[in-house]
Amino acid sequence: MLFAAASVLALGLAGSPAFAQSEATGEEANDEIVVTGFRASLENALNAKRDSNLIIESVTAEDIGKFPDQNVAESLQRLPGIQIDRENGQGSKVRIRGLEQNVTLLNGELFVSGLEVYKVGEGNYNRNDSLEGVPSELIGGIEVFKSPNASLLEGGLGGIVNLKTRNPLDLQDGLTVAGNFKMSKGSEIGGWKPAGAAVFGYNFNDRLGIIASFSYEQTKNHVNVLGGDNRGNWAFADGRRDTATVPTNYYAPEYRYITDRDQYRRRWGASLGVNFRPTDELEVSAQYFHSDLKIDTREASAKFPFGQGESQGLVGSYNINENGVLTDGTVRAQSAEVISFVDVSKIKSDNVQFGIDWDNDTNFRASIMADYSSSKMGREVANNDVRFTAYGVRGPGTTGPQPGFTPNPAAPATFDFTYKNGDFPSFGIAPGSPQDLFSNPAYGFFKSHWAFGDRSDIKGHSIRADFGYDVDDSDTNTITLSAGFRYGQRTVDFTSGRYLADYRGKGELDSTAIPAAERVPGYSYNWTPYGYFQDGAIGYKICDLPEANKPAAFAGCTRFGNSPALITPYQTMTSNPERVETIDNFAGGGHVAGDTVLVADRSQMTNALQWIQSLYPDTPFSFFADPLQTYRVKEETKSGYVMADLGGLDDPYHVNVGLRIVNTSLTIDQNQPASADPSYWGTDSWNGVLRDFNTVRTVRRYTDFLPSVNAVFNLSEGDKVRFSAARVVARQPLVSLGQGFATQFTRDPADDLFKFTNGSRGNAELDPFRAYQFDLGFEHYFGNQGLLSAGFFWKEVDSFIVNETVAVFVNDQAGGRLGPVSQPANGSGGRVKGFELAGQYAFDFGLGFTANYTFSDTSTDFSTDFSNKLPLPGVSKHSANGQIYFEKYGFAARASYSWRSKQYLGNFGFADGGTTRTLGIYQKSYGQLDGQISYKITDNFEVFAEAINITKADTSVYLQFPELPFRYESGSRRIYGGVKFNF
């Protein structure tokens, strides 16, 4: 750990964490314990909970470099009141009592992981504050504070997660070496991948200590996914194209995606800690923490259109239930397509801390801590659509009027597919359509290609000072006064952009260069000779010009008609078989007819720019930042606190009262179009990025007063009552503050026009989350690691930030249309109340268990077309965790089960003709079983095996009705096997 003051501050023990003498002694004793197993890890966590004067849960390492789980978030989910979100089988975001608005610290100060703001998947879903990039081997322990005191850093509505590194002065004298080596494998994908860690420490007679840690891990994982929820053009009644033949209204998504997804991860990390104690009174320390994560996600998705766009609607027989859910039927569609999507993200972060702690064992102490953090994220994404139904393109010639042609003439014009509903629906090919549609290369045309990327750069620094004074340092009626101040600054620069093709070499014009005197009134000269979608159906934009402006060679041409070919060369699966990848047992089998699907080879797409440039060697590509998805947020905070602690070692009570004052300054730079008719780098708004824009700077300043009181009363040697009350504040999501207006478009084959489908935008005027919270708890300690506890909590939240879906009119190639736009807003307040029950015990013969249950009842003013007073998004009303373990004679085994009930995730809205419909999104209950087994061959050498998600539990999300599937992700089991050593 950084230094004594910071360590005790992180523990949040009694009164002033930095200076409560009685508590510091206990903490030092805990750090000196060399834990040797999971049983000892639980004992240390239990002692920390009992000794703390705050409401706290903790996880400690079983030994140096030996954390209880492979993933930091997975370990936290075992604690009472803790739930986690998962992404591709990995624990990611932590929820405390169901709330995601928490703050993650490293040794008591702000921590930057690089995953504060990022996007995932073909739908470009915004994500934030993931812990999946933190190597667990570099962590000595984790603490979760459910109640704050005034000295703790603000920012958690649910609580505070504090990651702790090790203090080398707590090691035994001399050299310490520990580590592990293991191999891992995912259940649905072949091959084993390596991982390992090593820790080296040296303690020079408790005066100088050095510790260095290194970790490396590769994993690969496979999941099967139901997607398409990002496509906003659903229909129910007037919006459907089959209303004339299907009188019964039903929910028809724009597309269903059946996705076969592989993910490859490479993560390595390093940390270095130096603690120097030149005298008994003074300790100086430095800590460096580095992590480097690469995530390579490769998806292949078969797309099935339903309600709009490429669908002609239901044909033949069908069944629709009383809720308007299609349970089975046959749909006729113009397009049969498979998309290959490859997303490669690289995230690096560095955190550096320096500290000085002075304590001469009198009644005054002081400490200073400085922190610097930075991270960079780069994301490159490549996309390709393969068309298996006939597709018309421009050409075949590249000059003069052209008739257009079909490069895959063997393909059918339409096809009929069958649909069988379920959490993970099944799609077949109806009689009369080619049964080998997705596996016959004669049908496959590489229809369209595009590439984009994201960049983020996060920097932060802070300095703080803490002081403590014992008014009365006796063992009874002790009074300690504390005070401190902190200055912090953090900036987030996020850039999203597109790789655009430069068509100037092919003769495309720049309309903005046409002189004003030659312009025809009513035409918008706002486009330039660049393009994002490399799709053969798109002809020269010159053909859209008024005839007076067209060069003679383009006279009379139409862009989606007789235009010469612009985006060439054209490639099919027969002309370019080297581009074809065959996927057998697609999406686990049984969900796409034939179970074998041909796709564009995803292994060729891992370098997006290089890949797309190789396909069009005569057309140069460059990265263009999209101003509407590019933003900068700077946060500056000045805070101070005063605090008093009452109660000493011999007192049956401890009371802490304090006030923290935080002044926040936000500077938000967003971009918006410079006029009602701005120009674009690209031939269209949907086919490029905005060129003419203004940067709008919003400056916000506000001050929060955060009082807190914490009290502990010892009713007897084993019984405690705790009470806490506090005002808390949590920061707004950065992407919600900064994001501009992002829009999505798709081509409608009925008229060959690109039309607006859906969008999202941010809100610089968002206020932070604020709440009053109250806790009351009882703990009974008994026997050998015995605990029975009950706690009640209540939060009154002033205002939640909610994502609203509203219908917005957006201009497109067809003249504009209403479409769903998601935007954050400060909603009304809400209430979170509930209770936690926990118990644990360790029997003398080696068996032990832990168990906990949380009830969390929330209410807000959120509503849908079907319900009012909906719960807070992401909060499960019921959750439970249990572990049973056995350790004896060097053998150890452990089974862990985590479960959470149904949760409301938010609203989904869509424009259905002239009606905007709003439905709720819900995730079904989820339970996961994990297990570990190990044998200690010697005191220094151990072999082990671990399995995560043994039963391969699936994640299922539905829209309003449990039988209306919205998202699905199959469960994947991961197994590890290896050795651990410690010298």
Image: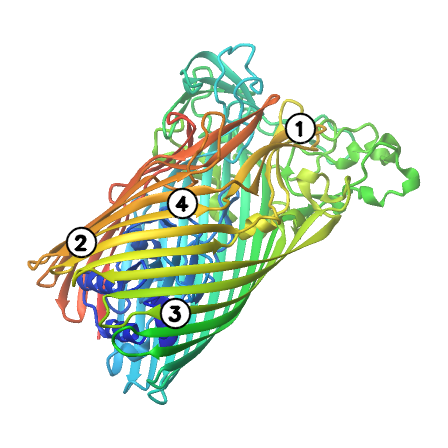
What kind of residue is marked 2?
Gln
Q: Nearer the viewer, mark 3 or mark 4?
A: 3
Sequence-first disc among 3 and 4:
4
Q: Position of residue 182 (x, y in %)?
A: 27, 60
**Mark 2 or mark 4, which is nearer to you?**
2
Are the residues at dot 1 and dot 2 in contact (C-beta closer than 8 Å)? no
Q: CA distance from mark 2 to mark 4?
A: 39 Å
Give x and y (percent) for residue 86: 38, 46
Q: Amino acid at mark 1?
A: Arg
Closer to us: 947 or 140: 140
**Which quadrant holds residue 982?**
bottom left
Q: What's the distance in space between the residues labelled 2 and 3, CA to CA?
A: 33 Å
Question: Which numbered mark, 1 or 2, is in the foreground of this view?
Answer: 2
Q: Horizontally, is 380 left or right of 536 in the view?
A: left
The answer to which of marks 2 and 4 sits earlier in the sequence is 4
Amino acid type, label 3: Ala
Residue named by callout 1: 817
Disc number for residue 262: 4
Q: Does the rendering let one see residue 741?
A: yes
Q: Residue 575: image x %, image y %?
A: 55, 36
What residue sits right under mark 3 in the picture?
A: 644
How would you rate the neighbour count of disc 1 (Cα within 10 Å): few for under 14, some for 14-19, many for 20 or more? some
State the CA–CA distance, disc 3 to disc 4: 54 Å
Q: Residue at x 51, y 11 (%)?
A: 246
Q: Which mark is residue 840?
A: 2
